[in-house]
């Protein structure tokens, strides 16, 4: 089957992994044809990310997401529960950078926290459903799942209010 590429041409797509941690999702993305730009604020993940980058097309950067002003063009942006931990004044700038990075047809896969989350009284970004829907205006929304449930967190019992977003850039 002809995929439109010529012999020797790299057909990898580009992904951005925000809040990449140890690089588990980054590795999965590489194994599925992506070159990955991986961002995390935690310096303890540096050794794992350096090992990953030594063998795979992963480009890690240890940085506070609030400090990112520009992201590379991407076919996929993944943020598993990283964006809600941004202060609200930093969230809007990061969201803008994400939207600008998305190429036509790119996929956005993010988790967001809602206003009824137990942590909503702490510093971070907690959104109403209407706010989430406004963020997704202009996108083809594939999935927008809002969930409220009691469960556990690293610090003990917690009420979760989350939005799972899967959308495609036009």
Image: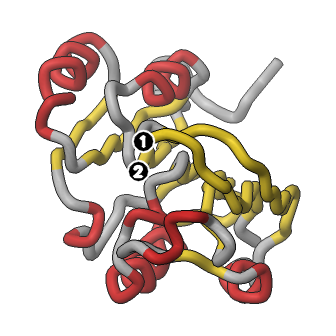
Residue 8 x, y percent position in the rendering: 46, 19
* Residue 51 as seen in the image, left or right of residue 94: left
Q: Residue at x 59, y 38 (%)?
A: 152
Residue 109 horizontal side relative to residue 55, left or right: right
Position of the C terminus, as image quadrant, is: bottom right
Q: Secondary structure at mark 2?
A: strand
Residue 59 quadrant: top left
Q: Is residue 118 above or below residue 132?
A: above
Name the secondary structure under disc 1: loop
Q: Which residue is mark 2?
A: 18
Mark 1 is surrounded, within 10 Å at the Cα level, by few (under 14), some (14 to 19) or many (20 or more) other residues, namely few
Is residue 138 something one can see in this rendering?
A: no
Where residue 81 sits: x, y (%)?
52, 51
Judge the density around disc 2: few (<14), some (14-19), many (≥20) Cα neighbours within 10 Å: many
Q: What residue is rendered at 65% in x and 57% in y?
A: 108
Q: Quadrant of the N terminus?
A: top right
Which one is in front, 14 or 157?
157
**Mark on residue 69?**
none
Mark 2 or 1, nearer chain start:
2
Question: In the visual, does 65 lie left or right of 3?
Answer: left
Which one is in front, 90 or 50?
A: 90
Say if residue 127 shows up in the picture: yes
According to the picture, the residue beneath numbered tag 1 turns out to be 155
* Contact (Cβ within 8 Å) of mark 2 with mark 1: no
Eye-nearest disc, 2 or 1? 1
Q: Residue at x 81, y 57 (%)?
A: 147
The mark tally for this picture is: 2
Residue 24 is left or right of residue 126, and the answer is left
Residue 37 position within the rendered picture, expressed as x and y whole percent measured from the top left: 34, 43
Work out how far the residue at label 2 is from the one at label 1, CA to CA, in angstroms: 23 Å
For the point 44% across and 44% down, the residue is: 17
- 130, above or below 103, in the image: below
């Amino acid at each position: 089957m002809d995929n439109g590429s010529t012999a020797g041409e790299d057909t990898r797509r580009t992904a951005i992994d925000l809040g990449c941690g140890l690089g588990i999702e980054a590795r999965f993305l590489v194994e599925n044809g992506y070159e990955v730009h991986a961002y995390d604020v935690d310096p303890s993940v540096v050794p794992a990310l350096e090992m990953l980058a030594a063998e795979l097309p992963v480009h890690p950067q240890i940085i506070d997401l609030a400090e990112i002003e520009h992201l590379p063009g991407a076919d996929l942006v993944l943020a598993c529960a990283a964006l809600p931990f941004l202060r609200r004044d930093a969230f809007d700038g990061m969201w803008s950078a994400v939207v600008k990075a998305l190429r036509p047809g790119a996929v956005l896969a993010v988790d967001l926290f809602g206003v009824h989350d137990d942590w909503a009284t702490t510093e971070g970004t907690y959104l109403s459903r209407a706010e989430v829907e406004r963020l997704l205006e202009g996108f083809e929304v594939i999935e927008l799942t809002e969930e409220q449930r009691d469960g556990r967190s690293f610090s003990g019992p917690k009420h979760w209010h989350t939005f799972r977003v899967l959308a495609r850039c036009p």
